[in-house]
Amino acid sequence: MIFRRKLLAVFALMVFVSVAAVAGLVLMVTRNAFETTEKQQTTALVAQFQREFNRQGEEVARRVETIAASEPISRMATAINGALSLEVLVAGVGVGAPGEPVPATTESVPDGVTFSTTSL
């Protein structure tokens, strides 16, 4: 091989290695930049999700407290604990006035079972 061809081959090899090294370096820097950006976006998304989750939880807790503090729920809880009679509950929903006896009714369902309020 003559000297000119050897020189051309060495020069071409050096150009190829230099271009490959620069391309590899650009690839690594670009990949690191994208990974950093993705981590920041993921962290921001997780933080936003946690804030929204906590806000929704507080909203649900506030609604439950509002419902629990309402008059009908208080009366129902008191009735379940046995402090009120069925007559007071029925009177509270508009069937009769407080102190009036519960009207006697009898209901039958298709399977033959009969319900009566006379024993209440």
Image (tube, rainbow, N blue to C red):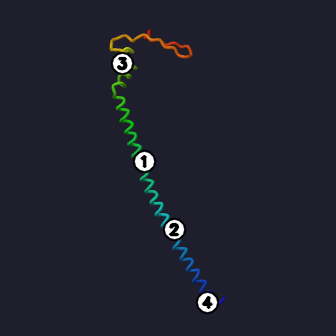
**Which mark is nearer the camera, 2 or 3?**
3
Q: Tell me the element at label 3.
A: loop
The picture places residue 64, in percent across and down from the top left corner, at 38, 33
Q: Earlier in the sequence, mark 2 or mark 1?
A: 2
Q: Tell me the element at label 1.
A: helix
Q: Residue furthest right?
A: 1
Q: Is residue 29 above or below residue 76?
A: below
Task: Read off the residue under disc 1.
Answer: 49
**Alpha-carbon span between mark 2 and mark 3:** 78 Å
The picture places residue 100, in percent across and down from the top left corner, at 34, 11
**Alpha-carbon span between mark 4 and mark 1:** 66 Å
Amino acid type, callout 3: Gly
Q: Is residue 34 above or below residue 104?
A: below
**Alpha-carbon span between mark 2 and mark 1:** 32 Å
Task: Read off the residue under disc 3.
Answer: 94
Task: Read off the residue under disc 2.
Answer: 27
Q: Tell me the element at label 2.
A: helix
Task: Read off the residue under disc 4.
Answer: 4
Q: Tell me the element at label 4.
A: helix
Residue at (53% x, 77% y) in the render: 18
